[in-house]
Image (spheres, rainbow, N blue to C red):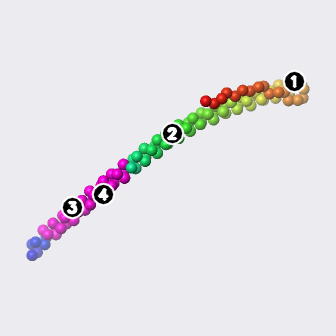
Amino acid sequence: MNELTGPLNRVEAALNQLCNDLGTLDVLPGVEQGVSQTNERLARVEHQVSLTRAANEQTAATLEAIRVDLGEVVRLLAAGLVSGAQDGSGGLAAAPSVTLRPRG
């Protein structure tokens, strides 16, 4: 009987391993579907990041243009105030007319 026990134990171990392998195979489609869904979500997030980055770059460019316009307005106002002080009237001179260009 002992001579049968060793081979039976090996067969039992092999069957257990086979059952484990088959169980793993049953899980694989679910794992693959989960990976696929995660990849789809990642692609959507990357697309949103790209859109946000482009919007931020546009906003930065717009803010820079506004900064330049404000600098020009301040320069013109300062020039008007200086010229008013130089004309000896003691009052403030009218600031030069400033027209800001529309954003597009």
Is 97 drawn above or below residue 3 in the view shown? above
Return the disc, 3 or 1, that comes first in the chain's sequence: 3
What is the CA distance from the residue labelled 1 to the residue labelled 4? 89 Å
The residue mark sitting in front, 3 or 1, is 3
What residue is pinned by disc 2? 51
Quadrant where the N terminus sits is: bottom left
The span from disc 2 to disc 1 (Cα, nearest Å) is: 54 Å
Q: Which residues are magenta?
A: 7-36
Tag 3: Cα neighbours inside 10 Å, few (<14), some, or many (≥20)? few
Amino acid bearing label 3: Leu
Alpha-carbon neighbours of circle 4 within 10 Å: few (<14), some, or many (≥20)? few
Quadrant that contains the C terminus: top right
Residue type at the position of mark 4: Val
Tag nearer the camera, 2 or 1: 2
| Numbered tag placed on residue 87 in the rendering | 1
Q: Which residue is mark 4?
A: 27
Secondary structure found at label 2: helix
